[in-house]
Structures are given as structure tokens and as C-alpha cells.
């Protein structure tokens, strides 16, 4: 049976505080103890982070801009943003992830030159649905994959309500081909399949944004052998910035 929304979130939280934490910290890290698939995912994800940083810098220097990194994981995006002087809220549903991100940020800061614009992020354990505040930009990378579309719609609406200028999202695209791959994958559940993955169609994401008055302005697609992500940059409809 399908888990209810609440159970789903509780399961995701439990996963990213335990086996999921160990697995993803390793994938997002730089140590050699990863297998071929994990290494491929590491490289794909790094490309998503790079593409996001490029999109963010397109609008001008990041120093002083406020950015919410919702579902920050180990800080793969928050830390480079902090290094450029952005004022970052790094939040995640997993306390283990937030603590890891904080440790990594402190380690990164400790090797910065004295004149570095580095702004230590604010770290917060929170599911993104409970976040409040107002930010120039809200970013949410590789989080929607853990939720079905109805849930993702609500998450997108909430994230948009927190953003003044831009919302950047990445998700695993639902196309016939990836849908097929996922179905095949489900026939062979391996030990690493601790949570299930949901794919989202760009049209559904676009529709969820449109309903709350946002439109997609810029898109990217990142793919390696085992990692697939659509990256979209959305702005309020009517915004010319
Ligand atoms: N965004 C980070 C990155 O790209 O490096 C981490 C991506 S990782 C695959 C997914 C992260 O989303 C995990 O750290 C997990 O704890 C977090 N997460 C899952 N559901 C969440 C929710 N409802 N609110 C906030 N964070 C959530």
C-alpha cells in the first residue's frame, strides 16, 4: 500500500538520519570508497551544483543576496554560495545532514583567506514545508525525487511563497525512457533502494509553478550514466528582472 503523506515524510526523514545519511554523505563527499555507480552519481550531482551556481551568478554577484537552500544535504551548494558572500539559510529535514553541512562549512571557512567574503550560513533542521521567511532566491536540489507529484505541487507552492525573485529546482525527469528505466529498476529492488524515487514531468512542475503565478525562465538538463536531473529556474510571471 502507498504510504500516506505524513508517513512518507517520516520515512524520508528516518532514512536521511540513518542509512541514507551514510550513503549520501559518501556520494557527495570526495573519498575513494565509492562504487562505480556512486561515483557516477557524484559527478552528475556536481554538474547540477555547477549549473545552479552558473544560473545564480547570471543575475549578478551573489554577495549580500539572501538564499534559502531547502534540503541542503551536506552543504554541496550552501558552502560555495557562502564562499561568495551570499547570506544562506541551509535547512534540511535530517538533523544528521544539517550537522554534517555545518561541520563542512566550518572546515571550509577555516581555510579561507582573511579577506574572504565567506558568510557562515545559518543552519536549521526543518522540513521545507515548515520554513518561513523571505529570500531573494530559493533553491531546492534533488529533493522532489522523494515525493509524489501531489506532494511536490504543495512543496513547489510553498517554496515559491518564500522567494522574492527566483526559485531554482531540480528533479528527476519523467519521460517515457526514464519511466521505463525506473519500472525495470523496481523489478530488481537492491539493498540501496531504501526509499522509492518519484519522477516528475516538466509539464507538471511547470503547471504547479503557473498555479502560484510563476513561470520557467531557464532550463538545464544534466545526465550521466546513472544520474538524471532537470534544472529549472522560475520567476514570478510578469517579472522582467
Ligand atoms: N540538496 C542537496 C544536494 O543537492 O546536495 C541534498 C540532496 S539529497 C538527495 C535530498 C535531501 O533532501 C536530503 O538531505 C534529505 O534529508 C532532504 N529532504 C527530504 N525531504 C525533505 C523535506 N520535506 N524538507 C527538507 N528537506 C528534505
Image: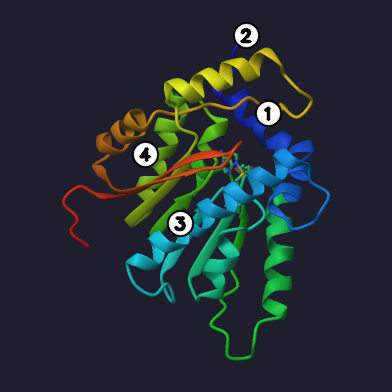
- Mark 1 lies on a secondary structure that is helix
Vertical position of residue 58 compared to residue 52: above or below: below
> Mark 3 falls on what kind of element?
helix
Which residue ends up furthest to the bottom in the rendered image?
A: 115
| Sequence-first tag of 4 and 2 | 2
Nearer-N-terminus badge (4/3):
3
Quadrant of image for the N terminus: top right
Per the rendering, the mark at residue 52 is 3
Instruction: Check residue 1 in the rendering and tell me which mark sits there, or answer none.
Output: 2
Q: Residue at x 57, y 21 (%)?
A: 182
Q: Count residues near mark 2 (Cα–Cα under 10 Å), then give few for <14, some for 14-19, many for 20+.
A: few
Residue 106 as seen in the image, left or right of residue 171 = right
Q: CA distance from mark 4 to mark 1?
A: 22 Å
Q: What is the CA distance from the residue labelled 1 to the residue labelled 2?
A: 14 Å
Task: Please tell me which residue lies in front, 216 or 139.
Answer: 216
The answer to whether residue 113 is above or below residue 80 is below
Question: Which image quarter has ligand 1?
Answer: top right
Q: Is residue 2 above or below residue 150?
A: above
Q: Position of residue 218 (x, y in %)?
A: 31, 50
Q: CA distance from mark 4 to mark 3?
A: 20 Å
Q: Mark 1 = which residue?
A: 11
Toward the right, the furthest residue is 33
In this rendering, does residue 135 appear at all? no
Could you say where residue 67 lies in the image, as x and y percent from the top left? Answer: 45, 62
Residue identified by numbered label 4: 157
Determine whether the residue tagged by mark 2 lies in a helix, strand or loop. loop
Q: Nearer the viewer, mark 3 or mark 2?
A: 3
Between marks 1 and 3 in the image, the one whose residue lies nearer the viewer: 3
Where is residue 207 shown, x and y percent of the image?
Answer: 29, 31
Q: Is residue 158 visible to the viewer in this orientation of the structure? A: yes
Disc 3 residue crowd, few under 14, some 14–19, many 20+, Cα 10 Å: many
Amino acid at each position: 500500500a502507498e504510504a500516506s503523506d505524513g508517513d512518507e515524510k517520516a520515512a524520508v526523514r528516518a532514512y536521511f538520519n540513518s542509512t541514507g545519511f551514510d550513503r549520501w554523505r559518501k556520494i557527495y563527499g570526495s573519498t575513494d570508497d565509492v562504487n562505480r555507480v556512486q561515483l557516477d552519481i557524484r559527478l552528475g550531482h556536481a554538474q547540477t551544483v555547477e549549473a545552479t551556481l552558473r544560473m545564480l551568478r547570471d543575475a549578478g554577484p551573489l554577495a549580500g543576496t539572501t538564499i534559502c537552500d531547502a534540503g541542503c544535504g551536506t552543504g554541496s551548494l550552501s558552502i560555495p554560495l557562502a564562499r561568495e558572500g551570499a547570506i544562506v539559510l541551509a535547512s534540511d529535514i535530517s538533523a544528521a545532514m544539517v550537522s554534517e553541512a555545518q561541520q563542512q562549512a566550518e572546515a571550509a571557512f577555516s581555510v579561507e583567506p582573511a579577506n574572504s567574503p565567506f558568510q557562515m550560513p545559518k543552519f536549521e533542521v526543518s522540513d521545507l514545508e515548515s520554513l518561513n521567511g523571505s529570500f531573494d532566491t530559493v533553491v531546492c536540489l534533488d529533493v522532489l525525487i522523494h515525493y509524489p507529484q501531489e506532494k511536490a505541487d504543495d512543496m513547489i507552492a510553498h517554496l515559491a511563497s518564500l522567494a522574492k525573485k527566483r526559485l531554482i529546482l531540480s528533479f528527476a525527469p519523467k519521460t517515457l525512457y526514464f519511466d521505463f528505466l525506473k519500472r525495470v529498476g523496481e523489478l530488481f529492488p537492491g539493498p540501496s533502494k531504501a526509499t522509492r524515487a518519484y519522477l516528475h514531468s516538466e509539464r507538471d512542475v511547470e503547471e504547479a509553478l503557473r498555479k502560484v503565478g510563476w513561470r520557467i525562465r531557464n532550463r538545464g538538463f544534466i545526465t550521466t550514466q546513472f544520474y538524471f536531473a532537470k534544472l529549472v529556474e522560475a520567476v514570478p510571471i510578469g517579472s522582467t528582472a
